[in-house]
Image (tube, helix red, strand yellow):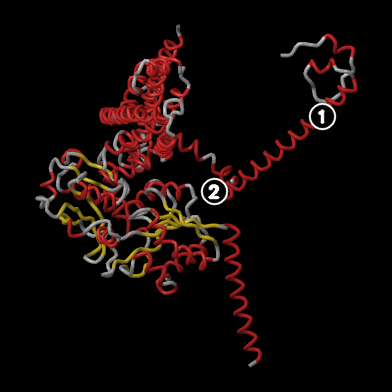
Amino acid sequence: MLNRRHLLATTVVLALTGITAFAQSWSSQYPELVFAKVPDENASGTAERWAPFVNYLSKELGTKVTLRIANDYAAVVEGQRAGNIHIAMYGPASYARAYITGAKVEPFAIEVSGDGTKGYYSVLYVKAQAPYMTIKDLKGKNLCLVDPNSTSGNNVPRFAMDKMGLDPENFFGKVIYAGSHENAVIGVAQGTCDAAFNWWNDEQESNLLRMERKGMAKAADFRIIFKSDLIVNSPMAYLTALPENLKTAIKKAVLEVHAKDPAAFDKIYEGKQLPFVEVDHKAYEPVVEMIKFVDDAPRGALACPAAASWRVPEGPTMPGALLRLPPEQLEHAFSVYAAAVAAKRLRTALGLSCLLAAIALAGIGGEVDLVKLASNIDRFPNYIRSLVPDLSWANFGADVAEWFWNLDVWLQLLADTLLIAYLGTLLGAVGAFLVCFFATANLEPRNSIRFVSRRFLEFCRTVPEIVFALLFVVAFGLGAMPGVLALAIHSIGALGKLFAEVVENIDMRPVEGATATGANRVQTIHFAVLPQVASNFTSYALLRFEINVRTAAVMGFVGAGGIGQELVVAIRKFYYTDVSAILLLILATVMVIDLVTEQLRHRLIGAERRP
C-alpha cells in the first residue's frame, strides 16, 4: 500500500513538473501573447467586453496576454502576417482576407449563436417609415456599408447584389464606408444614408439591439428589407508558427471559458451566445471563394596684441579684454570662470540625465521594444516595395495606365479634398480674423475678454482635427461637411494665435493717431492696423491652406469625405498599387500647392518690406 501511495504521489509530481516546464517554456519564448479584436462598437466598449476574457487566458496559460483593440480589420491581418499578433478574433471575411494575403493563421474556435446555429445574417436596414420594400427600390439612393473587410457589412451584400444583377457603385447614388456597424446605423438615423447593411443573429441579438441597450438607437425606428443566406460565424485564430503545446493550451482554454469563467464569457456576449466550439479552415472555404469573387469584381575672433606679454593659464578660453588684467586678477577671473563652467556642465549633465531617464520611462510606458524594432525594421522597406507595381520599358505606357486605372475617380475625389481644405481654411481665416483682435494686449485692454479669447483659441487648436471630424460625423453624418467644419475650427485656433501675434507687433503710432482723431474701434482697425498686417495675414492663411490640404487627405479615414476615404479602402483591401497611386497623386498635389503658395507668400512679404 505504501508503494502504491509513493507511485501515485510520484506520478502527480511528474505531471505537475511537466505542466510547469511547458508553462516555463512558453514564458521564456513568449513572455507576452497579444490578443487582437476589431471593435464592433466603440473601442472602449469592446475593451470592456473582452478584458475579463483576456485576464482568464493569462491565468490559464501562465503567461501575460495583452488585449489590443485594432482600428480596423486590415490592422489585425497585417499584425498577424508580421507575427506581432498571436491570437485574433476575426470576422469570417477578414479571416478569409488574412488567408488570401498569406497570413499563417489557423482558426480553432467559432462563435455559436443563441439558437445553436454557427452562423448569422447580413440584413439591410431602412427607416421604419421609409417607402422602400426591396433593394431595387433604393435605386439612386445612398447606401452605407461598414468596412471593405466586413463580412456582413460589405462582402456578403456585394455578393448577394451581384446575384441580383446589381452593381452597387452604379445602382446607388453613393456608396459610403461608415467604418463600423454602429456608424452605419447612425448614418441611416441621421439621413446620411437611406439604407445600411449590418449583422443580425436572431430576434434576440443583433447590433441594433445592442445599440438600443446602450441608448444609442431605437430598434422600432428601423425595418429590415433584406436578409442574406446564413453566414458562418466569426472565428478565433492563432499563428500557425506557435508551438503545438501552446496552441493546444490556447484552444483548450477558449473552449472551456464558459465553464471555468462564466462571468468572463457572459461579459462578451451578454448571455446571448452559446459556448465556443472547435472549427478549422474548411468551414471558411466558401467565404474565401466569396472574397476572391468580390476582389475580382472591381477593379572668428581677432588675436589680442598684448596677450603675448602675459602667460595664459591652461584651461577655458577667456575674452581678449580680460587678458589685459594683472596676473593676480587674471588668475582669479579664470578660477571663477572655470567654476562657473564646471557648474554649468554639471547642470547640463543632470539635465541630460533627467531627460534620458524620462525617455526611458516613456519607452517603458509606451512598450517600446528596441529588440523587436531591430528585428522587424526590415519589414518596413519590404512593405514600401510591395506598393511599387511591376513596370517594364516594353509596356511602360500600358503598365502606368493599369497602375492609375481609376484616375478619373481619384482626381474627382482629390478635387473634393481641395474644396474641403479651401472652405475649411476660408471659414477658419474669417473666424480667426474676428477673434484675434480681442486676444491682443495692445488693442484689448479688458483682461477678462483677452483671457476668454485666448483660451478659446487654445481649445480650437489643441483638439486634433480628426477628433473634431469624428464628433461632426456623429452629429451631421458622413460626407464632406464634417471635414470642412473640423478644419475650420482648428484653423481658427491656429490662425487666431498667429494673427494676434502679428497685431501685437505693429507700430502703435498710427493707432494712437487714429484714436486721437476720434476714430472708433472698427475704424482704427481698418485704417491703422490692417494696412500693417494684411500681407502677413494673407501669408499665414496661405500657409494654413497648405497644411489643411495635407490634413484633409486623411479626413476620409473617419468618413469625412475626399480622397482619404478611397485611400483607406485601398489600404484595408490590400490593393497595394492603388495605395501608391493615390499617395503619388496626393504628393504631387501638395507639392504644386506648396510651390505656388510659397511664391505668393514671398511676394506678399517682400511687398510689405519694400519702402
Tell me the mark number nearer the camera, choosing from 1 and 2.
Answer: 1
Judging depth in this view, the residue of 81 and 582 nearest the camera is 582
Q: Quadrant of the N terminus?
A: bottom right
Residue 369, position in %: x, y? 58, 47
Query: In the rendered view of the protein, which quadrant contains the C terminus?
Result: top left
Q: Most extreme residue toward the bottom, as rendered?
A: 1
Determine if residue 534 is in view.
Answer: no
Q: Position of residue 314 (x, y in %)?
A: 86, 24
Instruction: Classify mark 2: residues with Cα within 10 Å, few (<14), some (14-19) or many (20+).
Output: few
Residue at the disc numbered 2: 366
Mark 1 — residue?
A: 336
- Amino acid at the residue labelled 1: Val
Query: In the image, 161: left or right of 398?
Result: left
Front residue (pair 215, 227): 215
Label placed on residue 216: none
From this viewpoint, is residue 50 visible? Answer: yes
Please provide percent x and percent y for residue 202. 23, 64
Vertical placement of 357 versus 62: above or below? above
Residue type at mark 2?
Gly
Q: Label 1's element? A: helix
Name the residue: 31% across, 25% down: 398
Q: Which residue is at 41% across, 60% downward? A: 48
Residue at image position (52%, 67%) is 59
Up-down relation of residue 402 to residue 538 (above or below) = below
